[in-house]
Amino acid sequence: MSATAATSPRYTLGQLALYMLRLGAFGFGGPVALVGYMHRDLVEQRGWISESDYREGLALAQMMPGPLAAQLGIYMGHVHYHIVGATLAGIAFVLPSFLMVVGLGWAYVHFGGLSWMQAAFYGVGAAVVGIIAMSAYKLTTKTIGSNRLLWVIYLILAAVTVITESEIAWLFIAGGLVNWFVVAPPKWLKKGGLNAVAPAQLPAASGVLSGLDWPLLGQIGLFFTKAGAFVFGSGLAIVPFLYGGVVTEHHWLNDKQFVDAVAVAMITPGPVVITVGFIGYLVAGFAGACVAALGTFLPCYLFTVLPAPYFKKYGKLPAVKAFVDGITAAAVGAITGSVIVIAQRSIIDWPTVLLALATVLLLWRFKKLQEPVIVIAAALIGLAVYPLIHGHGF
């Protein structure tokens, strides 16, 4: 058990819920940035969560399938307030961005397309690269330190993520095992109980809300539950899985609609995975949005809450600590690699290069500068510059 968990909390459950609501409403940049914001706000600035608790949460979130930032937020709620805290933190974190994407889904259906979004995201995408680069830098310096073995694990995962443009789940487990065997080797060096367990498929949540097309809602619930239960890592990893099911297999959306759905997720705050709400709305209205979101986030909630007490109970053992350190190094390496992958898609010309560099410099110089201010300014710059550079009006 960590030091923080052994003492009474320095904050109320209401304060944590309000923080998660604010992070869900204003936290731009996807999983990399959101994970960094939680460390900065909850560990460094407010001291609500200890460094060891944060590391345990990050390691558990990376080990389990589902959206990384949402799982870490749920774990942060579990540290002092257990099931109630985890549940409230998870709902508060996801709710703001869910309501936003449902609203955008309504506008998309009623007014046709989001032609302005390409221009806005042209600017936002570049600024987001700067934001997540700073978050990745802080996470790296804080979690890796001067440990050579952790640096090797970190660099390997960063390189693999860049090359494959995906997060390979077994490599996180391998990073933990390697550090465990080197730092605190077991008496019998045989892989036994610390293998990645393929989670059982969870039941679909299609019956929660009323809707006209029950078979369709059942399909949506089943598909998005599988997405939440079997995809590891960040929003970056879930996009190919969603494309395969939503566009190729079920033909619920066409290519342009799917790209617009991903753009909505990237330009709105909160977890990137919240694009499932937008997709669900386009397929089956508000009921579809709710079923898709519940199907995606329920597995990640269960995969965080159920193992959390055991993770904390045995987290002090040298073998478990070494395993957590190794898997954390792997997670941060993958996060850093995903920064490069996102940059390759968002940094496409000189204006975007300048925007990304300006974002890094501003955040470096002005420590208290709020990211939403940068994101809004970048969106306005994108709306102004994109038509001039690329000759497209909207």
Image: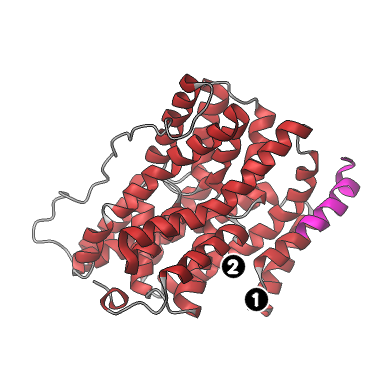
In the rendered view, would you say 279 is above or below 168? above
Amino acid at pointer 2: Met
Q: What label does residue 134 carry, if any?
A: 2
Whether the magenta-drawn stretch holds residue 150 is answered as no
Task: Tell me what residue is drawn at x 41 percent, y 54 percent.
Answer: 71
* Marks 2 & 1, CB-CB < 8 Å contact: yes
| Residue reaching furthest to the left | 187
Circle 1 Cα neighbour tier, 10 Å, few/some/many (<14 / 14–19 / ≥20): few
- Front residue (pair 34, 18): 18
Where does residue 177 sit, x and y in percent of width and height? 25, 56
Q: Is residue 145 above or below residue 21?
A: below
Q: Is residue 35 left or right of residue 194?
A: right
Question: What's the magenta region?
Answer: 378-394
Q: Residues within 10 Å of mark 2 (few under 14, many from 20)?
A: many
Residue in front for this viewpoint, 157 or 328:
328
Amino acid at circle 1:
Trp
Residue 74 in percent (x, y) is at 40, 58
Along the horizontal axis of the image, is 179 left or right of 257?
Answer: left
Q: Characterize the magenta stretch by its predominant secondary structure.
A: helix
Disc 1 marks which residue? 364
Q: Looking at the figure, which quarter contains the C terminus?
A: top right
Tell me, for residue 128, which label it has, or none.
Answer: none
Relative horizontal placement of residue 385, taking residue 62 as reference (left or right): right
For image coordinates 48% across by 34% down, the residue present is 209
